[in-house]
Each structure stands twice: as structure tokens, then as C-alpha cells.
Amino acid sequence: MTQDVVELRKKNDAHTPMKILHFTTDLMLGSQVNLAARPRGVAVELINRLDRLFERIDQITGLIILDLQSAHWSADQFQQLRQVHPTTVPCIAYAQHVFPELLAEAQRVGIENVMTRGQFAAAVSGMIERLTSVDA
């Protein structure tokens, strides 16, 4: 995760309990995020549709995580919903490295941090740790 995500967290209310919304249908990686977040007191909600994610946009105090390979992923819909519901909450998107078009599409619609699934899986615990320690 880039330093930009930590800086955005600092700009948001770093004293509010953190909540992560994870857009995915992958229960294995969803569990990995939850296991990394739980010991740090971070709530994680799995969401499988973009419209539902944006219905909860005001509840997000930490991070939006997007699985670009989810069945309901649409870069254009994400961009439209983000225009209607702007947020300063940092966004991380990931997909397997064999889908470079998905990664490029996420960057095109302005997602701040785009990485391969392997990079995300390896970094998720450290990302959450850094986000929860911004006041330290």
C-alpha cells in the first residue's frame, strides 16, 4: 500500500473506529482480510454489489477494498457511483496479474491504489496495521 493511503487516513478522522468495506465474492480472501483486521478492532463488511457498497459509503471510516474479478464489478458503474457519492476514503483494487486490462481499467477510473491479487494478499495485514497506527 502506498503512503498516500496512510496520508488519506490521517486526513480523515483517525480517531473514529475503522470500518472497511470489501467488495468481493471471494470468501477465502475476504476471510484473510477479516483475520488481519479483527485483532486490531477493525470491522470488515463483505459486499458483493457496487450499488450496495455505495449505499454504505457514509459508514466507511477506513478503507474500500475492491476485488476487480468479482462478478458484479464494473469500472464504469464504479465511476458513476463515485461521482454521485464522493468520498475521501482511500480505495485499493486488486486482480490476478493475468488480467492487466482490469488493473488498467481501475486506474483509468481513478482508483488510488491498484495491485495484483498476490501483492494484495501479501500486504493486507501490513496495510491494516499501518492504517490503525496513524495516531501512534
Image: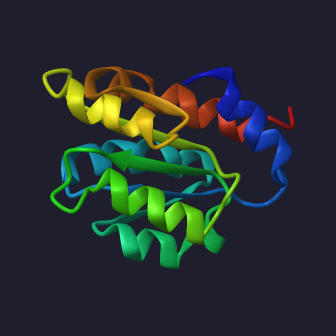
Q: Is residue 6 left or right of residue 111?
A: right
Q: Report the quarter where the C terminus lies.
A: top right
Q: Position of residue 12 (x, y in %)?
A: 81, 51
Q: Position of residue 39 (x, y in %)?
A: 55, 46
Q: Position of residue 74 (x, y in %)?
A: 28, 56
Q: Is residue 9 left or right of residue 50?
A: right
**Closer to us: 56 or 100:** 100
**Closer to us: 70 or 30:** 70
Q: Which residue is pictured at 58% across the width and 71% down the height?
A: 84
Q: Position of residue 6 (x, y in %)?
A: 71, 32
Which image quarter: residue 73?
bottom left
Q: Is residue 33 left or right of residue 2?
A: left
**Closer to us: 27 or 5:** 5
Is residue 48 placed above or below 113 in the rendered structure? below
* Colour treatment of the image: rainbow
Q: Which residue is pictured at 49% across the width and 71% down the height?
A: 54
Which image quarter: residue 93?
top left
Q: Which residue is pictured at 48% across the width and 67% down the height?
A: 81
The number of callouts visible is 0
Q: Report the quarter where the N terminus lies.
A: top right
